[in-house]
Structures are given as C-alpha cells and as structure tokens.
Image (tube, rainbow, N blue to C red):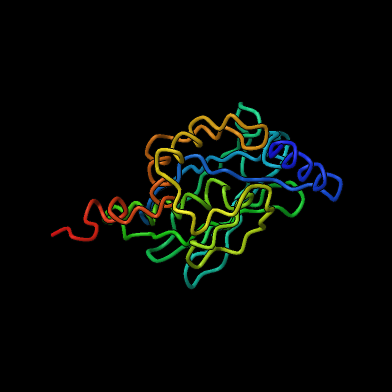
C-alpha cells in the first residue's frame, strides 16, 4: 500500500510539471587551491529515470570573487555528466549544479578550500553524512529537520521525513545498499558514503565522535 501511495504521489507531481534529482558521485571533503578536480554527477527525472541529452552547468561562487559558470559534459553512461574546474583561492566556496532540466538545481553545503600544499583533518562522520545527504540528492525527496543550515534546495516530499527518527544504523545501511523499492533508486553509493550517511541518520553520537560517546574518556 505504501508503495502504491508513493507512486500515486509521484504521478501527481508528473502531471504538475517535471522535477529532477541531482546525485554527486564522489564529493571530496575539501579542495586544494589551484588543483584541478572533476565533479561527476547524475540527473534523474522524478528521482528515478536517468536523463541524457541535458546541458548541466556548475556554478562556482568563491569567497570575495565573481561567480564562474562551467559547462558539464555528458559521460557515456545514461544520465551521467562531469565538469572539470580549478579550485579557487582558500576559503569557503559554494557550488551549485544546474541540472539542465527545467529550473532544477542542487546547492551543496559550502566546501572548504585549503591553501596550496595544505590539508585538513577528516570531518566527523555525522558532518560528512550531513554533507552527503544533500550532495546525493536525498534531501530532494526526504525532508530532514536534523540538517543544520540546510542549503536552499527544492524538497519534493515523496519519501518520509527523516529528521529526529534516529533510525538503526544497520537498517539505514541495508536500505541504501539494497533499496528494493519502486520509488527509491539504487544510487550506487560507496561503503564509506553509506557509513557516513548511516551515522547522520541514526543520530549515533558515539560513532559521530569517533567512538567517544557519553562516558568515554
């Protein structure tokens, strides 16, 4: 029944007009100024159907500098695109992917750019999971009140609200690796990305702090 209801909701949105979900494949935790990066992503109509033949763009908004718009190129796989760019000067950079399908776009969390030759400690698992929840397009279909300073993206509430639910980590991992759903697609997530998302969605404080939960010394 739930699957039928979700399918009916999607059908309603189709009749109202198209929408798309952008999923970033491999998002670095940070960028190094002056280095080249290739950002790969997929575009799915209504969260399901991979869309080819689009003309997506990446908008780069560096700190205290003008925006730069870079065209993406199609990959051989259906609905897959890539854009190569040079990381700007050190600071927080804002990246927005314009899908090329209507006005649908994905604003990522601000990304850190470190100075040439520099590095940054790994993000806590919860913070990384929150970043990926947006970058993978999860927030397009699932509202989540646990997101901090959420980028202003379109939210089509096809799936359930996930904020404050503290889902079991094992359940989250199984669901993302094997969706077995007529609505939720298999995004081909890496084990590392799934693990970070599971920490964020489960509210696991111990895992989020590297095992130093309450009572740890």
| Image position, residue 81 (x, y; %) | 60, 38
In the rendered image, the quadrant that contains the C terminus is: bottom left
Q: 181 or 53, which is in the foreground?
A: 181
Left or right, residue 20 beside residue 23: right
| Image position, residue 71 (x, y; %) | 63, 47
In the rendered image, the quadrant that contains the N terminus is: top right
Furthest residue toward right: 15
| Image position, residue 97 (x, y; %) | 60, 52
Residue drawn at x 49%, y 54% as measured from the top left: 165
| Residue 123 appears in the figure | no
Residue drawn at x 74%, y 55% as measured from the top left: 103
Furthest residue toward top: 76
Residue 86 drawn above or below residue 172? below
Q: 35 or 151, which is in the foreground?
A: 151
Furthest residue toward bottom: 64
Furthest residue toward front: 1
Residue drawn at x 35%, y 52% as measured from the top left: 204
| Residue 127 appears in the figure | yes
What is the total number of numbered labels drawn onto the structure image? 0
Residue 89 drawn above or below residue 72? below
Left or right, residue 114 beside residue 74: left
Residue drawn at x 58%, y 47% as measured from the top left: 137
| Image position, residue 167 (x, y; %) | 45, 48
Left or right, residue 204 beside residue 80: left
């Amino acid at each position: 029944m739930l699957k039928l209801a979700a399918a009916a909701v999607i059908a309603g949105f189709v009749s109202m007009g198209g929408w798309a979900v952008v999923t970033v494949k491999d998002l670095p935790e940070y960028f190094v100024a002056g280095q080249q990066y290739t950002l790969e992503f997929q575009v799915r109509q209504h969260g399901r159907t991979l869309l080819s033949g689009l003309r997506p763009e990446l908008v780069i908004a560096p700190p205290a500098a003008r925006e730069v718009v870079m065209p993406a190129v199609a990959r051989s796989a259906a609905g897959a695109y890539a854009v190569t760019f040079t990381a700007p000067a050190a600071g927080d950079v804002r990246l927005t992917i314009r899908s090329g399908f209507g006005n649908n776009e994905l604003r990522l969390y601000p990304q850190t750019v470190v100075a040439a030759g520099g590095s940054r400690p790994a993000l806590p698992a919860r913070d990384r999971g929150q970043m990926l929840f947006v970058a993978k397009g999860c927030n397009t279909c699932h509202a989540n009140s646990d997101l901090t300073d959420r980028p202003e993206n379109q939210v089509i509430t096809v799936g359930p609200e996930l904020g404050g639910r503290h889902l079991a980590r094992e359940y989250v991992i199984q669901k993302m690796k094997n969706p077995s759903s007529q609505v939720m697609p298999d995004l081909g997530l890496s084990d590392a990305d799934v693990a970070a998302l599971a920490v964020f969605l489960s509210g696991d404080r111990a895992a989020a702090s590297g095992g130093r939960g309450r009572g740890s010394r």
